[in-house]
Image (spheres, grey):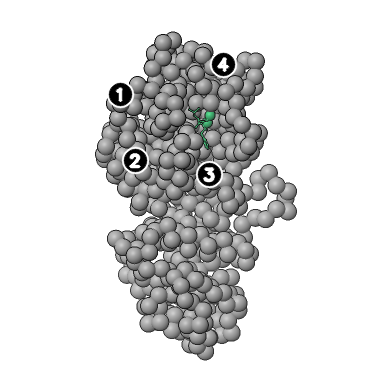
Amino acid sequence: MAYKVLSNILVKDTTSTSLVTLNSAMLVVMVNKDTKNNAAFKELDKASKGYISKSISSHLKDDGSSVLLPQVVGTKAESILLVKGLKKDTPIHKWLSAYQTIAKSANKLKAKDLSIMCGNVYPAGKDENWLIEMVAKTIESNVYIFSATKNKTAKQPSLKNLVILTTGLSRANLSKAKQAAKKGFAIGEGVNTAKHLGDLPANHCTPRIIEKKVKAMKKDFPKLKIKSFNENDLEKMKMGSFLSVGRGSDEPSRMMVIEYNGGNPSDKPVALVGKGITFDTGGVSLKPPQGMDEMKWDMCGAATVFGVMSTLARLDAKVNVVGVMACAENMCSAKATKPGDVVTSMSGQTIEILNTDAEGRLVLCDALTFVGKYKPSYVIDMATLTGAVVVALGRHASGVMGNDQYLADMIVDAGEESGDRAWELPLWDEHQSCTKTDYADLANIGGGREAGTIHAAAFLSKFTNDYKWAHLDIAATASYSSPVKAGTGRPVPLLSELLLSKRLK
Ligand code: BES
Ligand code: MN
Ligand code: ZN
């Protein structure tokens, strides 16, 4: 059950497509200094009797500024949106937001199809294929509108077809451009899948509901191998830590495993492990009521696994990846785990649960021990793990920590490349003492008010000695609360880039 909005993304070259007769609800022209010399644009301008170039000179002042021309006489498009194109040295997030705005205005205008002439300017170090991939990904993931729990009359995305217009591409380059669009579209689909799961209210997205949706993926992508473990199975595997989290809930916990083997059979898989707390009340260590609704997004790590696996399968990617989703509901009841309770993890290490609100690390540690059996080449976990990362890094970057510098570097790199950025925090020996307690091998909290994000990672590191591992704290990036509350689908773009680029060989 992947979640896709557009039905089609095409790449066409203006040497064989006339902008004058182009039948599109919305034609977008990114205007830069070369535009006036572009033959297709000249023809369009001529058909409008110079109205378009006049509009450019009188309306487009600042980079990214735009003017919408409804039904230009002499042209077939229902509207033409002129956008002052960005420059080589414009930061990537501004490029992303320019295309985000275009997607949103297409929905606002109820446009069914959109054609974009991107122009021949790219951010420094990038090329036309990067831009095409980014346009496809950004448009697909920004025409998304959540409506699953609203009335049938609720607003739906109008846009169905996107045409990306290039200029003067050779046949070989056009075929590369089409590949780039396909890749961007599939990543956008993965982003929307993750956004949708995150945006669903917690009573519409329990561990069992997620299990159903994961099993239904098989219909879209028969290549995936899907396994699901119920509480009895988790018990048999001795996952006492994982099970302690769902103890207070009437909703049983589930662990789903999605295997995708598109690579060489002898290549070890990369493992992705996602925190899937479908609602986090904090348990007995109850959270304050303000903003607690936002804890429905506490399963975004698991949603990321879902999204990335659908992207890989959609693209028939030549990689081996195993995704694990550790799903539980953290509630407060007479059966709930209490502060001071000691549980035994699958690794054999006992854990004193000093704070039931530090539950993410309790499900993750057992899932991390579990993936060891795949002998993975690398393991990456994604988790909305700490409020502290919001304070440390703000909403623009996910936090990266781990035990392998190459892996951490590749993650930061893929974040830069995809515009879904991450930043490394240290995880040193000195941070390891935070898990000390007199009553078990480990405590699930420590360090007081200091470095909460790093101390959470230090806890996880006690379970990842057997492989190369990185942890992504996505508490600040997977959703935001202003100006509106919404999931972002991050870090699907980062991880898709990382896995598809084969940086991890
Ligand atoms: N799910 C929360 C972290 C979180 C906070 C995510 C804000 C998104 C926005 C996590 O389970 C949690 O409660 N962490 C505690 C850890 C503490 C008890 C050591 C926190 O950050 O306060
Ligand atoms: Mn919590
Ligand atoms: Zn949580």
- Name above or below for residue 281 compared with residue 199: above
The numbered mark, 1 or 2, whose residue comes first in the sequence reads 2
* Quarter of the picture holding the C terminus: top left
Task: Give how far apart the Cα atoms at labels 1 and 2 are.
Answer: 21 Å
Q: Secondary structure at mark 1?
A: loop
Residue type, numbered disc 2: Glu
Task: Give how far apart the Cα atoms at labels 2 and 4 are.
Answer: 33 Å
Task: Give how far apart the Cα atoms at labels 3 and 2 are.
Answer: 20 Å
Task: Give how far apart the Cα atoms at labels 3 and 4 are.
Answer: 29 Å
Q: Position of residue 460 (x, y in %)?
A: 39, 26
Task: Give how far apart the Cα atoms at labels 3 and 1 are.
Answer: 32 Å
Residue 424 badge: 2
Question: Can residue 87 be seen here?
Answer: yes
* Residue found at the very far top of the displayed protein: 439
The numbered mark, 3 or 2, whose residue comes first in the sequence reads 2
Residue 466 badge: 1
Give the foreground label among 1 and 2.
2
* Quarter of the picture holding the N terminus: top right
Residue type, numbered disc 1: Asp
Whether residue 324 sits left or right of residue 286 in the image: it is: left
Q: Position of residue 377 (x, y in %)?
A: 30, 32
* Residue found at the very far bottom of the displayed protein: 49
